[in-house]
Structures are given as structure tokens and as C-alpha cells.
Image (cartoon, rainbow, N blue to C red):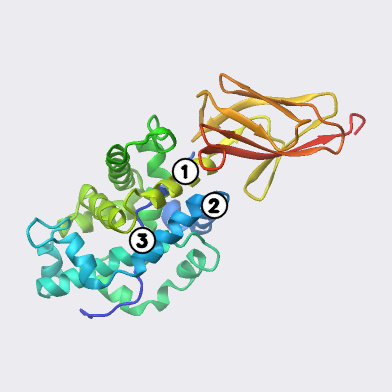
Amino acid sequence: MFKKSYRRVMWSTCSIVLCLSLLLSSFVLPVKNAMAGTISDIAEQLEGVYYWLSEDTQGMDAVKNAKTSLSGKNQDEIKSILWPQVEEGVLPLDGVKERLSCNEEEAKNQVAKLLVDGLGITLSGSVAGTLEEIYDNYDNYEEDREIVADLLPGISLKQLYGFFNYAQLYGIKETAPSEWESIFTEKDYNEIRSLIKEWLSGALKYASENGGSDCVDVYNAMTDIGWTADELAEAECTILSTVDLYLQSEIALLKAYVRSKAHFSGATGTDGYMETISYKEGSSASGTISVLGKNFNTPLECSSDNSDIKLSYTDGTLTISGGSAGSTANITLYYDDKDTNWIYKAKVTVTSSGG
């Protein structure tokens, strides 16, 4: 049954990818389970992304500002962004009108709301009390179920949201294995926008081809109403670039996703989502850095907040030494800006040589 007002439908195509990713991993689960049996895993993965976003003050501010700008847009503004009067719209509406038995204006209203609500959740910058609550209470979203049931017959809200989450968490790794560094190094906005759109589209296609029967069903249902991965990616970038001209929020989420997949082979434990490294006084810790499951050897700068604990990073190998028993340090590996363009952080502790 078609209704004109709905609660939030959680359509999230970001990042981190990545959104992300986004968004947004270094492994691929048996996908039927990824859709049905690993909701807690998806929530945990996204919590990791949002943790690393919280470590990036400027990135978190960019996400908050984009969400504030997005929430300030009224329905007519969003519709004019997606369907300019003098240009062809970003998303085709003929299939929507047919499925919902509505006119073009009503179709625009519903599609605009679906996309904006999904982006609003992505830009929340937090998972606790949001993602898990949504999953736990999906059966209570009666109006949302009705619109999705009419628009995408046979598809549930969990399937729909699971499809986009699968793309976020698994697709970006497969679609940008050699280009992800651009979000840290590329300065040209148009190039960044082009890459993000390509990654988003690729992640959705990856999910449709590798996400098992549930993902295939969701993607087929969307193509049945004339929506493709390219068009969905373009719609997100179009809205985002309107509320966040230089896509700083999307870049921040993609960076957070990459950071959540950066690891040091010499790490000895974790503290929450941050790796911990310990070695005995007079010794050292050495190992390789990997990102998204692959060894990483791009030249980076190193920083330690304890001058007694020294860092050396050469050809992908990080060596940490110095300090007396009980010494600690927060270390950072970064490109050209320690505050905004870092890729790896960890906590270091020096233990007693006799312990």
C-alpha cells in the first residue's frame, strides 16, 4: 500500500565505503551468512570505522557539518538537486511511479527521502544505539516495510540495508585495491569525486555479484525499476557534493575505513580498536605495515609523543626501539600532515627486561 509519509529507511551507500566506506573488509564471509547471520559482525565492523573517525577531529567535524547541512535541506531542495528542471534527473522515475502507482511528484518525494535518510545515518558518526537498534527493531518499521515491499517486491528492509552494508564493508576493498591512497594524496577535487563515484558504483556491483542470493535479489529488484549501481552512486555524490562541496565528509569516512584495516605485524595486542605494541627494555619491535590485507611500502613520516621511544620506517618495515621499562608512547605514521593525513596509530609500552 502506498503511503506519502514514512519513517527512516536506512539506505546507506557510503564508506567507507567506505564507506565507507564505506563503506566500509579484509575478508569475505560466506555471503548468505553475511546477510543473515553476521549482523553483529557488520555492526562491529562499522563501529571500528566510526572509532577511527573519532580519532580524526577535522574529519569528524566535516561529517557533522555535512549532516547539519543535509538536515537543513527541505524536500523541494533535494528534489531540485536530483531532478533539475532543465536536465535529465539522476535517477529514473518511471519504474517507481509504476510500482507505487503514484505520479511523478510523489515518486520524487519518496525517493528523495529514502536517499537523504540513508545518508543521514551514514553521517551520524556513531553506531552505538543506532545500527544495532535499527537491526533489532526493523520489524517495528511498519511504514518503511510497506514502501519497500511495494517498490521492491520480495525484499525486506534487512535485505536492503544488508546489501548496502555488504557493499560498504567488502566491496571497496575489491574495487579500489590500488587507488585508495588517492584519498590521502590526491588534491584535485574533480579527480577525488570521480574516484569516489567509481568506487561506490564498483562496490555495489561487487555486492550484487558476490553477495549471495540476498544481494542478487536486492540488486535485481532495483534494476527492475531502472536503477543501476552507476545511477545510485551518482545520486549519492550529487547530494553529498551539494551539502559538502569538496566531499570532505566522504573522504573522512573513507580514511576511517582504511585506518580500520591498517595493521602492524609486530603488534602484541589491542586496546579497543587500536593496536598495542610492547617490547622489553633494551630490545625492539619490528614488523611490516599492511593495509586492506596487503603489504604497504609507501614512504611515510613517523611520530612518537615520547622522545625516548624512536621510530624507523623503511620500505614498509617499522622498527620501534628505546625507552626504559614502564615507558609508553602514542605513535603515528602519516603522509604529509600528522593531524589529518595519518594512516596508522598505536600505543607502545616498554616492559622490564626481566619480565
Give the spatial CA distance, label 2 vs label 3: 20 Å
Tell me where residue 266 appears, x and y as whole percent: 68, 30
> In the rendered structure, which disc, 3 or 1, sits on the residue that comes first in sequence?
3
Mark 3: few, some, or many residues within 10 Å (few <14, many ≥20)? many
On residue 255, which mark appears?
1
Give the spatial CA distance, label 2 vs label 1: 12 Å
On residue 57, which mark appears?
2
> Is 125 rendered above or below residue 187?
below
Tell me where residue 221 appears, x and y as whole percent: 22, 58
Q: Residue at x 26, y 50 (%)?
A: 233
Mark 2: few, some, or many residues within 10 Å (few <14, many ≥20)? few
Give the spatial CA distance, label 3 vs label 1: 17 Å
Q: Amino acid at mark 2?
A: Thr
Mark 1: few, some, or many residues within 10 Å (few <14, many ≥20)? many
Q: Amino acid at mark 1?
A: Lys
Q: Quadrant of residue 329?
A: top right
Q: Residue at x 33, y 44 (%)?
A: 203
> In the rendered structure, which disc, 2 or 3, sits on the residue that comes first in sequence?
2
Q: Find numbered disc 3 in the image and state the secondary structure of the residue it sits on.
A: helix
Q: Is residue 235 left or right of residue 96?
A: right
Q: Amino acid at mark 3?
A: Leu
Q: In the rendered image, which quarter contains the N terminus? A: bottom left
| Mark 3 lies on residue | 119
Say whether residue 22 is visible. no
Tell me where residue 273 appears, x and y as whole percent: 62, 48
